[in-house]
Amino acid sequence: MEIYMWWLDLHLDSKEWLRENLRAEELPLQVLQHIAEAGGPHPDKVSGVLTLADWDFIETQSEFVD
């Protein structure tokens, strides 16, 4: 599912973490859980969860005033 479909439902703390740690290779368990709960990918591991397009969205399209 495309990030814009689940980004609005993502927990604010996780949005902030993703913005502050842009393009991180590994994501904390809590962030992974929030992504899955919002309807995003359900990963088997902590790396490679988000695509380059997802990171581009977070960097350029996501609103800082959620």
Image (cartoon, rainbow, N blue to C red):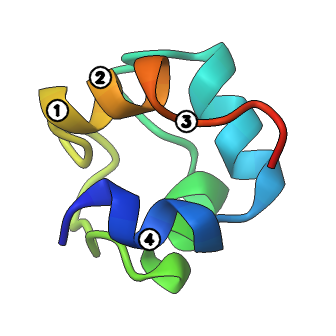
Q: Residue at x 24, y 48 (%)?
A: 49
Tell me residue 42's x, y (percent). Answer: 28, 75
Per the model, the C-alpha gap separating discs 1 and 2 is 5 Å
Q: Could you tell which of marks 2 and 3 lies nearer the N-terminus?
A: 2
Q: Secondary structure at mark 3?
A: loop
Per the model, the C-alpha gap separating discs 3 and 4 is 12 Å
Taking 63 as reference, is 52 left or right? Answer: left
Per the model, the C-alpha gap separating discs 4 and 2 is 15 Å
Q: Mark 1 and 2 residues: CB-CB less than 8 Å, in contact?
A: yes
Taking 4 as reference, is 54 left or right? Answer: left
Tell me residue 61's x, y (percent). Answer: 46, 30
Q: Could you tell which of marks 4 and 1 lies nearer the N-terminus?
A: 4
Q: Which residue is mark 4?
A: 6
Q: Residue at x 62, y 74 (%)?
A: 9
The amino acid sitting under disc 4 is: Trp
Q: Mark 4 and 2 residues: CB-CB less than 8 Å, in contact?
A: no
Vertical arrangement, residue 18 with respect to residue 21, above or below: below
Give 50 or 25, whichever is nearer the viewer: 50
Give 45 or 23, whichever is nearer the viewer: 23
Q: Which residue is mark 1?
A: 53
